[in-house]
Image (cartoon, rainbow, N blue to C red):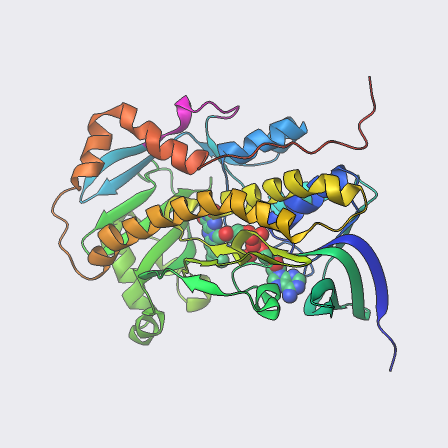
Amino acid sequence: MNSPQTLSTSVCIVGGGPCGVMLGVLLARAGVDVVVLEKYPDFFRDFRGDTIHPSTLDLLFELGWLDEFLALPHNEFSTVGANIAGETIGVADFSHLHTHCKFVAMMPQWDFLNFLAEHAKRYPTFHLLMKTAATALIERDGRTTGVKAVGPDGELEIDAKLVVGADGRHSTVRALAGLTVGNLGAPMDVLWMRISKHRSDPRAALGVITTGHLLVTLDRGDYWQCAYIIAKGSYDVLKTKGIEALQQSIVEVAPFFADRIAEIDDWSKCSMLEVRVDRLEHWHRPGLLCIGDSAHAMSPIGGVDINLAIQDAVATANLLADTLAAGAAPSDDELGRVQDRRMFPTKVTQEFQVFIQNRAIDPLLHGAELKRPPLAARLFDEFPLLRRLPARLIGVGVRPEHVRTPDAYATQP
Ligand SMILES: Cc1cc2nc3c(=O)[nH]c(=O)nc-3n(C[C@H](O)[C@H](O)[C@H](O)COP(=O)(O)OP(=O)(O)OC[C@H]3O[C@@H](n4cnc5c(N)ncnc54)[C@H](O)[C@@H]3O)c2cc1C
């Protein structure tokens, strides 16, 4: 049997999602040697979070990459409305945010990740290994000192001063590290699908909510990216009723889809997102740190998951880059500072999401009659100033991060 290929680096990041790639690019830019492992051969994943929030656009501005990014094909929206019980209500208005871009950009996640990876590759210390899955941790004297992985050429052993689990909500790293996950619960799952757009369609409202139904419709130019919210665990029951039953439910809530709902003629046209709201008690142990979805899976309410994952990456780079660039391994205290910094925004956001889930979504999915929009929604509609609050929560979030890491390759004027 061939012995595994061995590599040595400062940081081995497991997972090439928004969190892992953003951390990789920031550390490499600061002169730190980084290996990012991604188990898939490319970034192409349909129906992943495609929202780039004003706070993330601010980060791209701080990095000097914003204009280049906005030159890529994307859509923008600066207000969010919903049709609740037949009434159209304004919910969020991003146009007053104190950010460079006063809108949310919609771009396929793989375009965003390719953009980041292309920038990262300009730094000689950035190494992205695609089609390479982490399978085990290497431990020495109670400390994680690397990762075992399987790539296109066989087994690999990567020695690292720090291993970062950025491998998403079903994280292998956090399971291997034995970190304890607390589940906050979620009453729903989400079926994602795309339905073509016609010129005669009603103007974009982000959501349509009627008794028993919740449909989110994201305007993607020539099609609607739709999220149909179903009661937790009901997907298999729904399937036994046949695809026609799903078609009918969607048309009930959005009648303008009647002439093209036949596009969803098979369950393979739907992608099921099992909604989880959870977080780790401890995000780290000696030599290892989990961030992004692997530290906290968020509810899709507000579409803020990617934002939080990216903010985690920025905070991690800000707090650890100096130590890593000096060739040292971050201490457990330093890793704890990342958790301390990011736990507060995570908790506040999750508590807010759980409140909405329990107060609004759960009753609705279980048949509570919706005769008119709830009071809070009517207030938002009546007092436009109030719409700045959800805009701030969604667009910027709690305690936004800024790029504090240097560009080690910047030429001095
Ligand atoms: C169907 C769907 C729709 C979503 N819609 C939205 C939305 O509209 N808005 C929003 O904000 N968020 C949305 N999300 C959530 C959003 O995609 C995540 O919150 C966000 O991508 C988290 O980033 P992350 O980098 O922490 O994890 P992920 O994006 O999950 O990235 C983890 C990466 O690690 C890789 N990986 C896993 N295990 C290993 C391993 N052992 N070795 C190597 N690589 C590994 C995975 O392939 C993946 O690329 C959606 C998620 C899904 C599944």
Residue sitting at the far bottom: 1
Question: Which residue is nearer to you in this view: 99 or 280?
Answer: 280
Residue 183 placement (x, y as % from top left) = 40, 63
Above or below residue 227? Residue 205 is above
Where in the image, quadrant-wise, is ligand 1 located?
bottom right
Q: Residue furthest top?
A: 413
Q: Identify the residue at image location x=41%, y=57%.
A: 277
Nearer to the camera, 324 or 45: 324
Q: Residue at x 82, y 21 (%)?
A: 412
Question: Where 268 falls versus 91 (above or below)?
Answer: below
Name the outermost residue toward the right. 2
Relative image position of residue 281 (x, y in whole percent) = 48, 59
Say if 358 sits above or below 84 in the image.
below
Is residue 94 a member of the stretch shown in magenta?
A: yes
**Count of labels shown?**
0
Q: In the rendered view, does 40 fall on the left or right side of 243? A: right
Left/right placement of residue 37 relative to residue 235 reads right
The residue drawn where x is 60% and y is 59% is 167
Tell me which segment is drawn in magenta.
92-101
State the quadrant of the C terminus. top right
Residue 103 falls inside the magenta stretch? no
Residue occupying the point 23% across, 59% down: 365
